[in-house]
Image (spheres, rainbow, N blue to C red):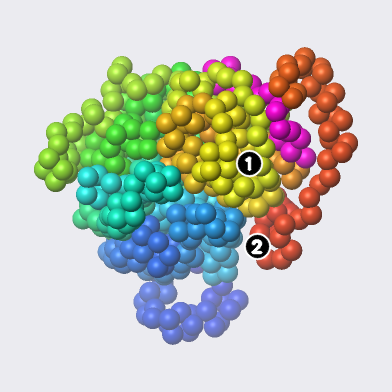
Amino acid sequence: MKNGGKNHAVKKSGNEKLAPELDPLRIGTGWTKEDLGKVQVMVESTYGDSHPGSGHLNILVEEVRKGIAEEGGFGARYNCTDICDGESQGTDGINYSLASREMIANMIEIHANATPFDAGVYLSSCDKGVPGNLMGLARVNIPSVFVPGGTMNAGPEMLTLEQLGMYSAKFERGEIDEEKLDWAKCNACPSCGACSFIGTASTMQIMAEALGLALPGTALMPATSPDLLDFAREAGRQAVRIAQMENMRPSDIVTMNSFENAILVHAAISGSTNCLLHIPAIAHEFGIEITGDTFDKLHRNARYLLDVRPAGRWPAECFYYAGGVPAIMEEIKEHLHLDVMTVTGKTLGENLEELKNNGFYEKCDKWLQEFNKRYNVNVTKEDIIRPYDKAIGTDGSIAVLRGNLAPEGAVIKHTACPKEMFKSVLRARPFDSEEECLDAVLKHKVQKGDAVFIRYEGPKGSGMPEMFYTSEAISSDKELGKSIALITDGRFSGASTGPVIGHCSPEAVDGGPIALVEEGDLIEIDVMKRKLNIIGIAGERKSMEEIDQILAERRKNWKPREMKYKKGVLRLFSQHAASPMKGAYLEY
């Protein structure tokens, strides 16, 4: 066993002596006297009727508990459900989304530390549930296994949910009738699981495995697959095993090299820009600093291989059929740290070799052939995950732009951006809320050559909601999608495409330069040179020294806004959220 992972006796916490009520209360919960002496595993999930990504997790939880019992342990169920960005989209409910990540991590800390456990198994599928669980897992730091909840199936005509924004925008413009819109709504989510594209939910499931915290091959499996049940059961067994090994806590497993592996996988899959919020926040819990610059450095010259929506052609269930994370890692193997430890008790390199020898890829291919029959297509593994020497792109998938408009950085997914917008000078059209901006876009008040700004939507401004509908309205417009840019201190859905730049830092509420932009300013975007600058005023170019002087004058007249939220979670988040480029975690 690597990493000193030899078996040892599980030590009792001592709580049963300090609190004599502990054992009888557990017996009253359903534990037997014999269970009290077993390896005790907290099974934490985001199960709830909140959305398809969490509605099925109770089934996986029971499989985990069976595996725990088979290995001689006892599994206790805990849950803190998550919210759905899709259900909250376009309402003030979306403002709670990023803050919910922090609350999930907080509840996991409370659950685990109020009554100590020997190990943990964590189950989640979606945007804030997965990073929230990974943050909590790191904070609790007991031997742990993460179980990704999988992806939903595609609907008829391979319809997937990220296309709903496009259908909605077309309906608003009168391009389709209500019947067609209703058809899309009724068929976009045919099963449980995360949305079937490489959005934030899918990206973060993949990141969990890439970090070595999930069993090999388990990320983004179809949620309806019997294989997922088997893996959940095995995760339960493995949790009991690592509880009895030395040096198998998350902090023993996850290192800077683990994060570098994950970021290279992120580049290969063209992962969600929200990953630049979540990976730094997870790393922060491990005492490791990851910044936007870390992503930018590793994405440069990295191969982009995955032909899955929203940037590619196929629904996310195809990811598993092509071999999942292991297949991606095989293609970029020469760039990975193969000696990092994983929850199997083996190194990444050892895991990859074992998968090649145990029939994993053959099993995946059988499912791919069933997919081909279902949709009457002939998709091959190489159609989904391109070989390294036939990459879709060779410069990763995201870039961090800097300049006098974003001194701390701003994020663009360049694989989803039209090439026409890689280098441009645009006229500023600032809006102080998404609602104002979306109305202007839909009513054709935004013109070619505009740089549309949505500000005061950062973590401290309004919770950092997604600008999904506005980005979809722009990208689905044949003219605007290739001639304007959307720049915000808010964020975007993992499904967003088009010329969109988010996480602009410092945010407007903190007096960042984005708050000082005025109508008619000239905005320079240069993706390849990583530039985002104000280069002119009222349509006239100025020197950078002149721009600095003008911004200094504007700053004198800028007045901080009154805090939007007066109580509750969003007030707490507004007061303590870190910069978007640091991960927007709570700084106390």
Residue 243 placement: quadrant: bottom left
User: Observer-nearest residue: 42 or 512?
Assistant: 512
Q: Secondary structure at mark 1?
A: strand
Find the distance from the CA under tag 1 to the CA under tag 2. Answer: 23 Å
Disc 2 marks a residue whose amino acid type is: Val
Q: What SS does tag 2 mark? A: helix
- Percent of width and height locating residue 500: 53, 34
Task: Please report whichever mark, 1 or 2, sits nearer to the chain's N-terminal start.
Answer: 1
Q: Which residue is mark 2?
A: 569
| Residue 387 highlighted magenta (yes or no) | no
Point out the residue furthest to the top here: 543
Is 211 left or right of 92, judged from the image as shown? left
Above or below 355: residue 93: below
Start and end of the magenta stretch? 511-532
Other-residue count near label 1 (Cα within 10 Å), few / some / many at <14 / 14–19 / ≥20:
many
Image point (74%, 45%), residue name: 509
